[in-house]
Image: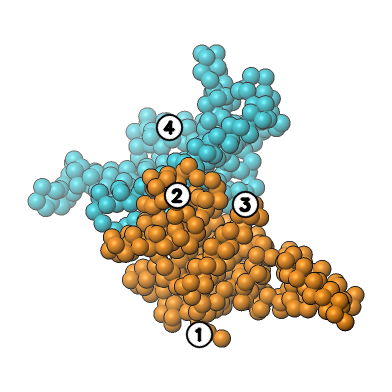
């Protein structure tokens, strides 16, 4: 049940998208989001959508998985669209009580909803096709220039990769503890708010204890293998940008430039 | 033989269906647990043992098939689920990690409290359950100050306090030293002997499982590969080895001795039984 949360999940695969350098993919997501927020018209939205659809198709991520990932944001999307629909300005087509629906309102509602959905789908493309280890390695490399400003980039990346690594474990652990307490007759979905909060205690106490224990064990294991921060540490597999990365980044830049140009043209 | 209390019918469970992680953990399992029996479930890691037993008190819903408690589907309604949870007690693997209360007493009382029993009844059950596992002197201590073996016994008491008619334990001996294993097994057996409850033990340890089990079920790749009395199961040593399992060492030894013409009396699973059988053999010779 808790496992069904696909947020940030990685679907292993062997497509061009999977093989791209993680730095490329992170930069592409940034370019994509910039393009999305510069899109103003049906046409420019269409261009961004075509790009997204192509990426999904090439990566062979099942549409079902994509839609499942959207579940947590459905509420926000619907609310945003409704507000845009009911409070638009311009030519009024229908009116009821304090609400009025305008032609511009309808357009804004559709485009805002589409923007949110495409935003979430685009960022999911990154986590669906990049393993957490590659993702943090990519981030570390991209942030490397900040080392000059004494930002502990390696340490931050290490913490992030450990956190990412531990999230599934924690979810699994929570599931197990919940089951064990349910077996002793605990119920988590009944009662008022205070009762529900109280019912969390039998889960949280064991969960905290096991997290501390796990952290302790991990620290010992790392020290036993002589970990002492990033200084002088080298990688077994060093990332290298290939031709496909340069081409992909070129496409991304073209996408952003195209959308901005369309906006300048008033489209 | 006694009538069945708990039954699974064509039980199938698929984890993460429709994703690349899809995994059929159980495939058409028919299992019968009879009133008052001791049933051992053995199987290689990943054979589906834990998945199977979590179906027995409706913690997991079957993908297809049914679980019947005295003929009634336990997933049928909320009240049926609640009933199954209190009548079928499930002790998870490493149950000591689910302790959370300030004192041992309060932790053992968690189950009975959830059953909405009267304070007097709760108190009676906590003391009785503590008695079964021998932790009466620890009731006022914090569960986190105890040794590993003590914690585990407290956790088992927490389930026993619900007085289940079927007590199911997932690898209750995992990670304990031989002395600790024996103690836990004796605790479980004393609950069985005094209350007549059925006991289902999932285990790797053939010796312990065989010592008192009336029946054994062997799981392999999510299906029931064998079921029968321990001596029937262990007689099929070659098949067991193919499934990554093995008969108890002493059983193998006795089979080899018999093959060599030594007429060992009775069935042998443990060192003690082997010793007794050899002594008996020796005694018989002495008299002859
Ligand atoms: N929560 C889960 N999600 C996905 N797969 C699981 C889950 N639990 C168990 N499995 C898989 O189901 C199979 C059976 O597991 P399990 O019932 O734990 O076996 P056993 O207890 O016999 O070792 C294993 O292959 C395991 O990887
Ligand atoms: Mg298991």
| Residue indicated by mark 4 | A34
| Residue indicated by mark 3 | B175
Chain where mark 4 sits: A
First in sequence: mark 3 vs mark 1: 1
Q: Nearer the viewer, mark 4 or mark 3?
A: 3
Please name the residue shown 62% across and 60% down the image.
Answer: B182
Question: Spatial distance from mark 2 to mark 1, Cα to Cα?
Answer: 38 Å
Residue B15 in percent (x, y) is at 53, 61
Disc 1 Cβ-to-ligand 1 distance below 8 Å: no
In the image, is B58 to the left or to the right of A17?
left
In the image, is B272 to the left or to the right of B71?
right
Residue A56 in percent (x, y) is at 53, 48
The quarter of the image holding the C terminus of chain A is top left
Q: Are marks 4 and 1 in contact (CB under 8 Å)?
A: no
Disc sitting over residue A139 in the figure:
none
Colour chosen for chain B: orange
- SS of the residue under disc 4: helix
Chain where mark 2 sits: B
Question: Spatial distance from mark 3 to mark 1, Cα to Cα?
Answer: 35 Å
Q: Nearer the viewer, mark 2 or mark 3?
A: 2
| Residue indicated by mark 2 | B138
Q: Nearer the viewer, mark 4 or mark 2?
A: 2
For the residues beneath circles 4 and 3, the answer to whether they share a chain is no
Colour chosen for chain A: cyan
Residue situated furthest right in the rendering: B260
Badge 1: residue crowd in 10 Å (few <14, some 14–19, many ≥20)? few
Look at the image and tell me whether residue B233 can be seen.
yes
Please name the residue shown 24% across and 44% down the image.
Answer: A84
Q: Are marks 2 and 3 in contact (CB under 8 Å)?
A: no
């Amino acid at each position: 049940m808790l496992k069904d949360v696909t947020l940030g999940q990685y679907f292993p695969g062997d497509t061009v998208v999977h093989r791209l350098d993680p730095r490329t993919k992170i930069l592409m997501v940034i370019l994509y989001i910039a393009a999305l927020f510069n899109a103003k018209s049906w046409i420019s939205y269409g261009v961004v959508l075509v790009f997204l659809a192509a990426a999904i198709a090439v990566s062979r991520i099942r549409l079902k998985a994509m839609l499942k990932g959207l579940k947590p944001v459905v509420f926000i999307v619907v609310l945003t669209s409704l507000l845009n629909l009911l409070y638009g300005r311009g030519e009024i087509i229908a009116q009821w009580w304090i609400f009025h629906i305008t032609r511009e309102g309808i357009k804004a509602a559709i485009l805002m909803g589409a923007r949110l959905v495409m935003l979430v789908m685009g960022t999911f493309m990154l986590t669906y096709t990049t393993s957490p280890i590659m993702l943090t390695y990519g981030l570390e490399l991209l942030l490397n220039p900040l080392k000059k400003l004494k930002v502990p980039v390696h340490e931050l990346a290490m913490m992030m990769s450990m956190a990412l690594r531990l999230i599934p474990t924690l979810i699994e652990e929570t599931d197990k503890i919940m089951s064990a307490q349910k077996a002793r007759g605990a119920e988590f979905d009944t009662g008022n708010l205070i009762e529900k909060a109280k019912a969390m205690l039998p889960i949280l106490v064991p969960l905290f204890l096991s997290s501390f224990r796990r952290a302790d064990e991990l620290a010992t294991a790392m020290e036993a293998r002589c970990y002492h921060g990033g200084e002088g540490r080298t990688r077994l597999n060093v990332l290298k940008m290939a031709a496909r990365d340069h081409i992909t980044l070129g496409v991304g830049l073209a996408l952003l430039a195209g959308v901005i140009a369309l906006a300048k043209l008033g489209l | 033989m006694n009538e069945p209390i708990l039954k699974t019918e064509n039980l199938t469970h698929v984890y993460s269906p429709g994703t690349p992680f899809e995994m059929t953990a159980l495939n058409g399992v028919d299992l019968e647990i009879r009133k008052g029996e001791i049933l051992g479930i053995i199987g290689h890691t990943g054979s589906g043992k834990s998945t199977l037993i979590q179906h027995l008190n409706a913690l997991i819903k079957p993908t297809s098939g049914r679980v019947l408690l005295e003929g009634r589907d336990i997933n049928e309604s909320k009240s049926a689920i609640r009933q199954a949870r209190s009548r079928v007690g499930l002790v998870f693997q490493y149950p000591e990690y689910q302790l959370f209360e300030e004192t041992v007493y309060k932790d053992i009382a968690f189950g009975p409290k959830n059953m909405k029993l009267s304070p007097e009844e709760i108190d009676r059950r906590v003391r009785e359950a503590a008695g079964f596992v021998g932790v009466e002197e620890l009731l006022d201590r914090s569960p986190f100050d105890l040794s590993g073996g003590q914690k585990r016994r407290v956790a088992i008491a927490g389930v026993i306090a619900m007085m289940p008619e079927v007590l199911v334990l997932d690898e209750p001996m995992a990670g304990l030293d031989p002395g600790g294993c024996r103690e836990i097994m004796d605790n479980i057996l004393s609950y069985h002997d005094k209350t007549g409850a059925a006991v289902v033990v999932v285990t790797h340890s053939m010796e312990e499982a065989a010592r008192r089990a009336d029946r054994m079920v062997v799981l392999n790749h999510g299906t029931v590969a064998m079921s029968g009395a321990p001596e029937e199961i262990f007689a099929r040593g070659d098949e067991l080895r193919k499934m990554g399992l093995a008969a108890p060492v002493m059983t193998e030894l006795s089979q080899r001795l018999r093959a060599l013409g030594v007429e060992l009396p009775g069935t042998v699973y443990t060192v003690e039984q082997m010793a007794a059988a050899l002594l008996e053999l020796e005694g018989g010779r002495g008299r002859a």
